[in-house]
Amino acid sequence: MDLRKLTVERVDTRSNSAGTAARRGRHFRRLDLKERLSMKTYVTGLASLMVLLTAVDFYAAEPSSPSAISEAVESFFASQDPFVRQTVLPNIEKHRQSDCTLAFVDDKGAAVLNVHVTGQLKRHQFLFGACPPETKADLDPRFVAAWGSLFNYGVSQNALKWGNVEKQQGRYDFSRIDQMLDLCRQHDVALEYHFLTGYHPTWLAGLPVEERGKCQKAFARAILQRYKDRISFFQVYNEDWLTHIPRAAVYFDQTEFFAELTREFPHVKFGVADCWSLDSSYPLPDPATLKERYPGISFVAAHAHKPRRLWASPEQMYQNFDKYLGSGVKIHLTEYGIDSGQIEGSYRQGTWTEEMKAECFVQVRAVAFSHPAVESINHWDMGPGVRSRTYNAMLNEDFSPKPAYAALQDLIQRRFGTVIDGRSNEDGEYQFRGFHGRYEIAVENQAGRRSTLSFVLAPDSTNHRFVVGGAP
């Protein structure tokens, strides 16, 4: 099989069996530039397309060959690692894709034949992320475009920490949170709040310990009351299980307060974070112990940045993740990154290069994506420049893409993308197999009536019915 052609799906079928349909009608092609850009570009015309191309000039660095795909992506899917071939790749098919049937009927409920269906996966159910823009440099339109066009999830880096929101006791400045949320809304990005109880503002040190705890609780509740319906996930505690950072210290009973929050905000997803690793160096805690300590917990957030230069093997990652299968607690990898220097771990050796970084970043995302206990992965320090992770930047100083960014584009948007183009069969059905997430489609019946529709493909949502008949 030529893996260069294994990019996104274009399925054309007239079979009643979705599985048979996908096998019969599937062929692969590379999305061209216009297809990879937002559907909004199509409806706003050529002028808008040219404006977007100017803002997003990093696309110009992409290989010009229509069959070109990142070597890092090709390398992973051609891997001879038995664990990748026997476990990781089959699990992607098993846990992240489903057969889907779209049924088209007229106003009276009769099947409509030969409906032309075109569209694509617009937003993954799985959360691929990078920290949202928060500094002046981040707010450069080129950075925002690079971030917003690729990722659907982000963990706040520093702007939302307690000391940056309540610099004066009792006076909250929500402006940076609101700005970040506006950007997330514009780009359909789910935000994870990092974190509700720290890092402490400087004024806290001058208070008695009991008063510190009251202030900590008050800040957490103030954030939750304002943002409980607008932010997807909240880390309650960070770096106070494994690492015990002084500026993240908690001044009250953690179990009691966590239980209070889950009772007060029953629909909010709460978690805890610490420097747990991808492998067994700093393994994830036992889920039973975690759930006892934090009643009602939804997710555990592993920073995944230690050891600092680690290249973990896929099997090591699974050994760390498997304990969470069936636990009811999802794994978030929230601060993933590496430092420059010699590669650590036994899986690969040598000195980190941009090409090796791209290969590793692809592997880590693909393995995380394949494991059913993992819900998200967030990249820390996307760049440009160096912040806390010395080798994490995926953008150059001019915001053009480094090999790692281009590789993740290929992985997320092409290899894990689904494009559909076909017609409904004699039963009024169009069937395909695709990755889970939200789809946007355009449909046209034989009378020329056109509609734009959306639906979500998920393991429990695979059949969708649309009315497309009647008078225009």
Image: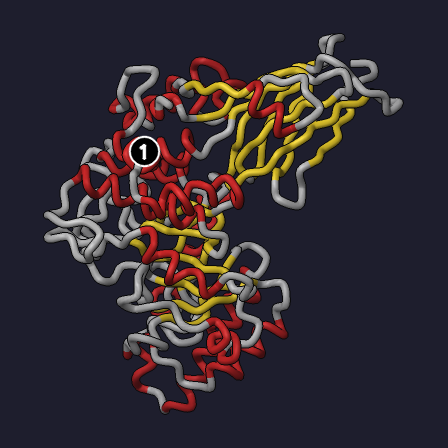
Specify the quadrant that holds the C terminus.
top right
The answer to whether 38 is drawn above or below residue 12 in the figure is below
Which one is in front, 4 or 48?
Answer: 4
Residue 176 picture location, percent across and down: 40, 55
**Residue positioned most to the top:** 447
Q: How is the image coloured?
A: secondary structure
Q: Residue furthest right?
A: 108
Where is 445 relative to 93, above or below? above
Q: Residue at x 44, y 86 (%)?
A: 252
> Does 260 appear above or below 171?
below
Quarter of the image where one finds residue 147: top left
Q: Position of residue 189 (x, y in %)?
A: 47, 45
Residue 198 place in picture, x, y as percent: 37, 72
Which quarter of the rendered picture does the N terminus lie within?
top left
Is residue 394 at all visible to an observer of this figure?
Answer: yes
Report the front residue among 11 and 303. Answer: 11
Q: Residue at x 48, y 67 (%)?
A: 271
* Number of numbered discs: 1
Residue at mark 1: 78
Q: Residues within 10 Å of mark 1 (few under 14, many from 20)?
A: some
Which of the two residues, 402 or 375, is positioned nearer the viewer here? 375
Residue type highlighted by circle 1: Ala
Q: Does residue 125 appear in the picture of this structure?
A: no
Kindly indicate the quadrant of the structure image that contains residue 13.
top right
Task: Work out whether 215 lies above or below 359.
Answer: below
Q: Which element carries disc 1, helix, strand or loop?
A: loop
Q: Position of residue 428 (x, y in %)?
A: 76, 20
Q: Answer with left or right where residue 109 lies relative to residue 387.
A: right
